[in-house]
Image: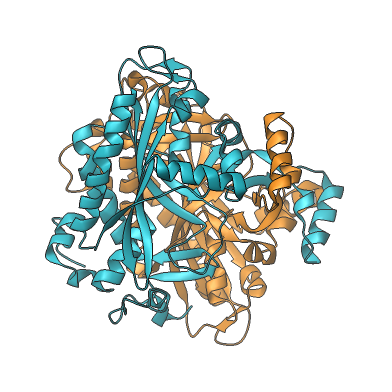
Chain colours: A cyan, B orange
């Protein structure tokens, strides 16, 4: 890394070349699908964090933040393995004695696959933030609806050279848990609210019917069903020549209510819906649209992200 | 989770009972060594983040942020496995076909140890933030010294019921890389600077000679050597009946310079030193010392963390 690379933002980034971000020191490359980031991009993230708080303020949510790690017991219960086995990350650790340590170390030095020297721990990486939310309401009958504003790092094992597809990334999720009517209203409302927010960032927005990346041939059937039944939509923006989903709106019906034993006042499994925003993708789309100099972004966008801030 | 648990901070927390934090909704418990946190604690973290930026501003560091995940190649090169095999977390993923998926899923449903159905990926969890920094300078001869202000989540596999000992936690590290004289000056300077900062937070501070938790019987010898040679010190504060290290100062000599091929202008391996602050432990110590109502914290502490902020 040279001082050139981290000195800040240079010339305007061609819309077709988001990779140029790295050359401008907005990102530092550490490996496929992993980036460090500098002060400018952190300013964009904190602006987005604040602006998103404004979007959900009228719903008076409980604000919760979660570490990047999820208890394995919650993960196993969530049925994630059934649908997305190709995406999760399980945390393994060495749990042997000094002799076993010597074998592990030799295996590492020789460049072997040393995974067999470790064992599954009680922890996995969080595949989405809302998986940390549902268990908090587990085993209860809600006396009304619940709204949670949840933040955290997520992991998905899909190494890629696309700058918008990271293995480790931040999600901001607004989760609603309650009656079927409340959950489906949340889902419908946030189609418009999420796309309006992204549009106010000065981005060209489309809302598209979508499906989750279910695994295998039976997964294709599930994805088709999800799309047909209109259970998922994505807010899509252009980044260079690509279309990238920066937010998604999801209706789960009673999936998580059933799994985590959350009941509505009437004793039936609660329904849930959530809207999730990908902070890294939003930031990337902003830089692709408005260029790398934050001070030159459109007034309305700067007001939305950094109202009150006067110096850079 | 009840509304009571998340409504905010209640009565003053007895100094001997930091666990009460959970009952006050400052933390929500998700598993051993893992907590979610609410708006109040996030306010403390952002105050600490800002205040720490002020501490290092005169050094004009490059600010870098890293994801919680580290490339496995960097980890293997770092020699972490030799010294701390009991602490790292390696990320495994399922990489099989539909038949293998069925076997994995059955293993999960039966409650078996399903680790054998996954394989080591190219990613591990970051055990410290500075491991993401050194490779950025790898293979270069520095024309001077480098100062990096690095932030990120770290993982250490030491599940514990102590609220100050988390498996997933945030570190803020100020790293200096350069000549032996520059690195050792950094190390000496930050004994005083780090403890002065923590004292300005209204905490009772001791600086103690310390050692890293090296593994095994030969590790004990390494720890004794490190302590005798005065290579590590910790800033320790009381939390209830415990003494907890909230910051550490470390001199690595040419350890990382040698490993990552970073050279000084004279062609010799560069030396490095770093000071690291544990945000969760600092926040816990603040609440233990000043109580759960942020608005009632001493004026000087509130000024340091949130200068300019007037409402809560």
User: Residue B210, percent across and down?
Assistant: 61, 49
For the point 56% across and 58% down, the residue is: A158
Query: In screen coordinates, is B8 left or right of B254?
Result: left
In the image, taking residue B55 as reference, residue A29 lies left or right, namely right
Task: Please provide percent x and percent y for residue A28.
Answer: 46, 71
- Work out whether residue A165 or residue B129 is closer to the camera in this orientation and state it: A165
Q: Is residue B209 visible?
A: yes
Please, which residue is most extreme toward the right here? A99
The structure residue drawn at horizontal position 57% and vertical position 71%, both measured from the top left corner, is: B135
Residue A126 in sight: no
In the rendered view, would you say A229 is above or below A51?
Answer: above
At x 45% / y 25%, what residue is drawn?
A: A257
* Towards the viewer: A151 or B101: B101
Residue drawn at (38%, 59%), measured in percent from left and top? A280
Above-or-below relation of B34 to B156: above
Location of residue A130 (image quadrant) = top left
């Amino acid at each position: 890394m040279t001082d050139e690379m981290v000195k800040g933002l240079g010339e305007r980034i061609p819309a077709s070349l988001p990779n140029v971000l790295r050359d401008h020191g907005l990102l530092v490359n550490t490996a496929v699908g992993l980036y460090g980031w500098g002060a400018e991009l952190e300013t964009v993230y904190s602006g987005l964090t604040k602006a998103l708080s404004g979007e959900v303020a009228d719903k008076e949510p409980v604000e919760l933040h979660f570490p990047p790690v999820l208890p394995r017991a919650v993960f196993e219960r969530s049925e994630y393995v059934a649908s997305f086995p190709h995406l999760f990350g399980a945390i393994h650790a060495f749990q042997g004695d000094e002799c076993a340590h010597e074998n592990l170390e030799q295996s590492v030095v020789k460049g072997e696959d040393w995974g067999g020297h470790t064992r599954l721990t009680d922890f996995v990486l969080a595949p989405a933030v809302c998986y940390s939310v549902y268990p908090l309401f587990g085993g209860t009958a809600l006396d009304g609806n619940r709204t949670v504003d949840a933040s955290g790092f997520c992991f998905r094992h899909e190494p890629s050279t696309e700058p918008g597809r990271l293995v480790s990334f931040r999600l901001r999720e607004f989760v609603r848990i309650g009656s079927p009517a409340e959950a489906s209203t949340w889902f419908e409302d946030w189609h418009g609210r999420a796309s309006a927010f992204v549009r106010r960032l000065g981005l060209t927005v489309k809302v598209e019917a979508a499906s989750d990346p279910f695994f295998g041939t039976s997964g294709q059937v599930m994805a088709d069903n999800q799309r047909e039944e209109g259970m998922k939509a994505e807010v899509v923006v252009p980044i260079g020549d690509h279309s990238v989903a920066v937010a998604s709106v999801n209706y789960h019906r009673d999936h998580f209510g059933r799994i985590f034993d959350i009941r509505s006042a009437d004793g039936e499994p609660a329904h849930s819906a959530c809207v999730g925003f990908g902070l890294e993708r939003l930031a990337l789309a902003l830089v692709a649209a408005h260029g790398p100099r934050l001070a030159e972004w459109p007034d309305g966008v700067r007001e939305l992200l950094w109202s009150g801030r006067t110096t850079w």
